[in-house]
């Protein structure tokens, strides 16, 4: 039986717990920690976890853990991941990997040095839409993919808590939402390397404190609401295969409805991962749209369970890790470049 520890007992850790509970015959969550000790205590009681701690160092020292989930706010990802890897654990770290590419590189280097698995919480890679798209690309159905669009636009969807505090989040919708769709496009394309970025960020609407929202809300309660991040980020990202990705991500934007979708355009066909999953091509001398039958969607609960299963399988050497650390590092290089480009008002080359 593999022993699991959770670092950070907030909202998304429940999705990791759900995945571990599906694998009760193989893993046991034996410890959890949170710098908010009452939260760790309540979490341990809720799930019947034997021990709880108020910091990861005491937990890692006292427990002989095999697997760790890092589900803290972003600024603690690097520190907690490095501590767990150095304690001999395999780690799944939530997205975004870190606050910067430099931190992400240090995390990967620690995993490599210890010979341990470091997986990223790129949950969208585990959706049926990602599987279907990867399959189409692998079979050459799209031809050469040369352009993609990725949108994660919320009309009013600032998650509150620490998400607007740059010192804990590292940024706004780009690092929180954009990361999902940039990664998914890159994954479907076959993980080309980013070479240059033009980005722009805005803070025109802020957090919109007076408007109610039904979006994801951080469980972290803050006394003083903080919002010193962007509310909209846009970018053009060029990859080493010549393809370009156009990205848009917002917490707040004056548009009719939320828009969350990915489209990839190839020389033979285009695909849209927004519901319904469709292929745009030509057939018998006419333009033709092909709607795929079946559940070609992303399902939050199902796909978190799949992600955790892939983590456990990969840690045991029974499966290939679908979201390895190197892809987290590439993603952080893109995010750094978007913020830098927005700051200087010019394109930025990604050097490695
Ligand atoms: N994959 C997804 O779809 C998805 C969805 C939501 C959040 N997330 C990611 O999950 C992470 C957590 O988000 P959340 O919404 O659960 O936040 P949350 O505010 O609900 O919980 C974060 C918890 O981490 C704790 N924490 C902070 N620093 C710590 C440290 N050094 N040691 C131990 N505990 C610490 C906080 O006290 C808090 O309880 C973020 O990185 C976020 O980007 C991913």
Image (spheres, rainbow, N blue to C red):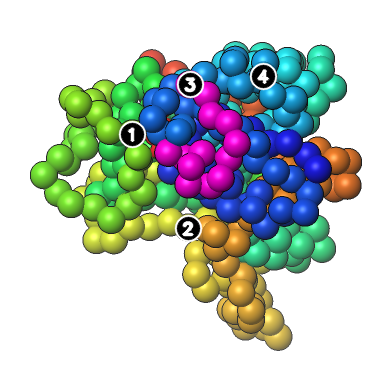
Q: Report x, y in % for residue 198.
A: 46, 29
Instruction: Name the residue rendered at 42%, 25% in the picture.
Output: 37
Badge 4 vs badge 2, beta-carbon distance below 8 Å: no
Q: Report x, y in % for residue 316.
A: 85, 41
**Above or below: residue 318 compared with residue 278:** above
> Who comes first in sequence, dot 1 or dot 4?
4
Image quarter in which the C terminus is found: top right
Q: Which residue in the structure is indicated by mark 3?
A: 54
- CA separation, marks 4 and 2? 44 Å
> What is the number of the mark on residue 62?
4
Q: Report x, y in % for residue 161.
A: 30, 33
> Who comes first in sequence, dot 3 or dot 1?
3
> 11 left or right of 295?
left
Answer with the quarter of the image where residue 170 lies: top left
**Above or below: residue 55 compared with residue 39:** above
Residue nearer the viewer, 277 or 280: 277
- Boundaries of the magenta span: 42-54
> What is the number of the mark on residue 261?
2
For label 1, the crowd category at 10 Å Cα-Cα, with few meaning under 14, some 14 to 19 and many 20 or more, is some
What secondary structure is marked by label 4? helix
What secondary structure is marked by label 3? loop
> Who comes first in sequence, dot 2 or dot 1?
1
> Who comes first in sequence, dot 4 or dot 3?
3
**Above or below: residue 58 compared with residue 326:** above
- CA separation, marks 3 and 1? 15 Å
Q: Which residue in the structure is indicated by mark 1?
A: 220
């Amino acid at each position: 039986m593999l022993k699991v520890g959770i670092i950070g007992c907030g909202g998304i850790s429940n999705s990791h717990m759900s995945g571990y509970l599906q694998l009760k015959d193989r893993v046991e969550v034996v410890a959890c920690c949170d710098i908010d000790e009452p939260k760790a205590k309540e979490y341990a009681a809720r799930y019947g976890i034997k021990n709880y701690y108020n910091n990861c160092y005491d937990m890692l020292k006292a427990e002989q853990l095999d697997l760790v989930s890092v589900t803290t706010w972003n600024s603690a990802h690097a520190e907690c991941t490095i501590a767990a890897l150095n304690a001999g654990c395999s780690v799944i770290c939530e997205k975004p990997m870190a606050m910067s590419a430099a931190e992400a590189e240090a995390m990967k280097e620690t995993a490599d040095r210890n010979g341990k698995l470091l997986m990223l919480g790129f949950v969208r890679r585990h959706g049926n839409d990602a599987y279907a798209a990867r399959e189409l690309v692998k079979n050459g159905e799209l031809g050469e993919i040369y352009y993609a669009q990725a949108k994660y636009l919320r009309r009013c969807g600032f998650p509150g808590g620490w998400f607007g505090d740059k010192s804990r989040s590292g940024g706004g919708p780009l690092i929180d939402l954009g990361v999902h769709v940039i990664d998914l496009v890159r994954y479907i394309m076959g993980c080309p390397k980013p070479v240059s970025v033009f980005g722009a960020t805005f803070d025109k609407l802020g957090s919109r404190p007076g408007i109610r929202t039904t979006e994801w809300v951080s469980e972290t309660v803050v006394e003083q609401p903080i919002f010193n991040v962007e509310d909209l980020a846009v970018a053009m990202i060029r990859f080493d295969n010549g393809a370009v990705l156009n990205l848009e991500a917002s917490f707040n934007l004056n548009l009719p409805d939320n828009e969350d979708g990915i489209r990839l355009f190839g020389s033979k066909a285009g695909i849209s991962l927004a519901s319904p999953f469709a292929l745009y091509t030509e057939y018998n001398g006419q333009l033709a749209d092909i709607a795929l039958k079946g559940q070609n969607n992303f399902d939050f609960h199902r796909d978190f369970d799949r992600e955790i299963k892939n983590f456990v399988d990969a840690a045991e050497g029974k499966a290939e890790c679908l979201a390895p650390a190197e892809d987290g590092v590439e993603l952080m290089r893109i995010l750094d470049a978007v913020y830098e480009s927005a700051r200087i008002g010019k394109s930025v080359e990604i050097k490695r």
